[in-house]
Structure formats: C-alpha cells, structure tokens
Image (tube, rainbow, N blue to C red):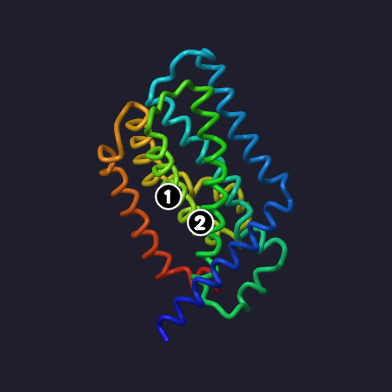
Amino acid sequence: MKNIGIWDFQRAAFRIAEKDLRTEFRRSYEVLSILTFSVGSILICSFAWGGGGVVEPEVAGAALWIILFFASILAFTTSFTREADRGTLGGLKTLPCTPLAILFGKIIYGIVLLFFVECVLIPFSIIFLNLDLGGRFPALLLVCLLGAVGLSFAGSFVSGLVMFSEGKTLLLSFLLIPICMPVLLPSVVATKEIIGGSGIAEVMPELRLLTAFLLLITAIMVLTFEFVLEE
C-alpha cells in the first residue's frame, strides 16, 4: 500500500505540473516576457559595465542570481494565484490526491520553467559578460539547477500562502526576499567560485547549505501546507 501511495503521489504531481506547463507554453507571451526580462537585463549589465571588458566573478555571479530571482517572481505570481483568480482551485481540491501532491506539482512546474530560463540566460551571460568557464560549464549548470530547485520550493510555498490575500502579487515579492536568502547567498558564492576557476569540489559547502535549506522547507511544507490549502 505504501508503494502504491507513493506512486499515486508522484503521478498526481507530474500531471499537475504537466497541466501547468501546457497552459504556460500555450500562452507563450508569459514565458517570452520572462525570457525578455532575463536576456534584456544581461544586455543592460553588459552595456553598463563597458560592453567588452571582463566582468569580475563576484559581479557576474551576483548579477546572474539577481536576474534569476526576479524572473522567479514573474514565474510564481502565476502559480497558485492563477488557480485562485480563475476559480479552478476548487477543482484541484477535488482531485484524488493529497494537498502535498498539488504543491509538488507546482514545484515541478517551477523547476522546469526556471531551468528553461537558465538554459537561455547562462549562454547569453557567457557571451555578453565575457565569462571564461573552460570545462566548468557542467558545474555551473549543476549549481544553477540546485538553486532553481530551492527557488521553486520557496516560491511555490509562498505563492500558496498568499493566494487568498489582497495584493498577493506585491506580498509575494516582499515575502520571497527573506525566504529566498538561504538559496541566493550560497548560490551567488558558488557561482562566483566556479566563474573564478574553482571546481565542483570547492563549492561543496555551498551545495550542502542549499540541500539543508531544501530539507528544512520540505519539512515545513509537509507539516503546514494541508492547512494552507484548506484556508
């Protein structure tokens, strides 16, 4: 029974994520707006910093994650709030799955969307910020993926918390800043180290911090999200 329950949980979560991704890419203007913001921000940074000079690793790492953070805000304002605004949240509640399956479906949706943005943003960053990664591109991609997972966990949970609130879009932005700090700070440090020439072994302390944050927020979600969805 336990294995069947886990399988049903996973299947429900992936179906919810698939539904959201189909909706998102069917109305491609929202994805295009996130990509336009991300790439445009990198271009502005490149022009502001001289357009041709080598950007310091500290500056490049911070810029990359600031842009990703604001891109995540654009992504998660349409997570649970879209269900609440359209009145489809009641339909989600009637599905034969637990509230956590709904939440993890939203998290999977966020991870895929943010990683898609990263796959476009990182090459543009390498080109326009003159980053010399050598053979460290897979390490940078791993850090960005783990950071995207952390942002998705935090963003999906906060989106669920504020979906019934007045001014939820503004409230989401304010709440995400302190909650995402345990993700942003180690991600910026790890990205800076990799751009500066370090390998994956040198950034393991930052990756452990990201993993610890994921375990902590997962425990909080397991204990509280059922009550959040009911309220």
Image label count: 2
Q: Relative to 119, is 1 on the left or the right?
A: left
Position of residue 142 in the picture relative to residue 94 (left or right): left
x then y, percent, for residue 205: 26, 44
Residue beneath the point at 49% across and 22% down = 129
> Around disc 1, counting alpha carbons within 10 Å, would you say few (fewer than 14), some (14 to 19), or many (20 or more)?
some
In the current view of this chain or complex, which residue is farthest to the front? 135
* Residue found at x 67% / y 40%: 33
Q: Which residue is mark 1?
A: 179
Q: Are marks 1 and 2 in contact (CB under 8 Å)?
A: yes
186 and 23: which is toward the camera: 23
Residue 26 percent location from the top left of the image: 73, 53
Amino acid at pointer 2: Val
Q: Amino acid at mark 1?
A: Ile
* Label 2 secondary element: helix
The kind of secondary structure element at disc 1 is helix
Between discs 1 and 2, the one toward the N terminus: 2
Quarter of the image with the N terminus is bottom left
Q: Residue at x 55, y 66 (%)?
A: 14
Is residue 163 found left or right of 196 in the rendered image? Answer: right
Dot 2, crowdedness within 10 Å: few (<14), some or many (≥20)?
A: many
Q: Quadrant of the C terminus?
A: bottom right
- In depth, the one of 200 and 29 nearer the eye is 200
x then y, percent, for residue 145: 44, 47
Dot 2 corresponds to which residue?
A: 158
